[in-house]
Image: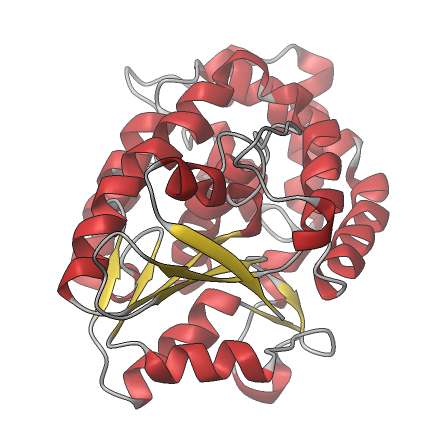
Amino acid sequence: MRQFCYSIFFTLLAVSAWAQPATSAKYAPTVEENALLWEISGKELANPSYLFGTIHMIGKEDFFLTDATKSSLEKAQQVTFEIDMEDMMDVAKLVPLLMKSFMANDTTLSDLLNEEDYKLVEEHFEAVGLPMMFLNRIKPMFLSALGGEDMFSLGSGEESQMVSYEMELMQMAQGRQLPIEGLETAEYQMSMFDSIPYTVQAQMLVESIKSGSADDGQFGQMVELYKNQDLQGMQSMMADEASGIGGYEDLLLVRRNRNWIPVMGEMMMAKPTFFAVGAGHLGGDEGVVALLREAGYTVKPLK
């Protein structure tokens, strides 16, 4: 059950990042401002808050936190993620989400795909030890995460090959007994993804399996861009990969970024906050950095 809970959590985080547009405007970060960590000040804030861009999963050997990031976290009085991480670790709260991972009206994956594509999906999951008889009613978007090798590499202790920035930061916050908050609820994200038709989700699943070997190289490229703090490079690469999202960009990214700004404002007025969201949300004229500047805050990069 833990692996499936992980798949739900990382799907909620990762799918929206695919929709990041490659755009620029007067408020958007410039090439010279490429950074993962940003200081937010001004607009009557008594103390600065901080915005950090994560990559949701990364190889243990590639994981890093700069001294500036650690220092910013130490200055914060609360830590906020896209969704409340502690809720995602609470089995009692996960069970209702697990129930929502099933398609409505007894729809099955075999209803959505032709025989050839269904066989492709079936063979893919059987190869990782997951019989389709247990998966046929699960929403295709979650199958996309559940079937990834990276998901099964995210274990615990020394056996883990992959680590999560969100989980590492949550543990650091818990070590300091800091409150942990979310910019939105997992229930909201689930309902948002439900706006994508099952047929579209199913085709996204098929395409993700077909391009699996290429994705390995793309993930490596993304990690290198992340390690170089190349925000614009990551943004451009995400835009190239976002064709499957198509007309759902506003739903998955733009609307959410705009919804976050007033929530962030209230949190920052209450106490200095360390925000950790997917790096794909930061750049562009509809990214969080630009929207905070548009709202009147001073946002500057920290290395």
Looking at the image, residue 222 sits to the left or right of residue 88; the answer is: right
Quarter of the image holding residue 179? bottom left
Q: Is residue 153 above or below residue 188?
A: below
Q: Position of residue 225 (x, y in %)?
A: 77, 55
Residue at horizontal 45 percent and vertical 54 percent from the top: 299
Looking at the image, residue 205 lies above or below residue 262: above
Q: Position of residue 121 (x, y in %)?
A: 66, 30
Q: Is any atom of residue 131 visible in this view?
A: no
Task: Give the colour scheme of this rendering.
Answer: secondary structure
Instruction: Name above or below for residue 105 compared with residue 35.
Output: above
176 versus 15 height, above or below: below
**Residue at image x 59%, y 78%?**
65
Frontmost residue, 125 versus 187: 187
In the image, taking residue 259 as reference, residue 136 lies left or right, namely right
Rendering quarter of residue 255? top left
Q: Indicate the position of residue 221 as horizontal and vertical percent values.
A: 82, 52
- Residue for point 74% across, 79% down: 61
Residue 112 x/y as whole percent: 53, 12
Residue situated in front as seen by the camera: 27 or 237: 27
Task: Report the side of 143 relative to 137 (left or right).
Answer: right
Q: Is residue 237 visible?
A: yes
Corner quadrant of residue 200: top right
Q: Nearer the viewer, residue 231 or 16?
A: 231
Instruction: Check the picture and name the quadrant holding the N terminus.
Output: bottom left
Question: How many callouts does the rendering have?
Answer: 0
> Residue shown at 64%/42% (left/top)?
125
Which image quarter holds the C terminus? bottom right
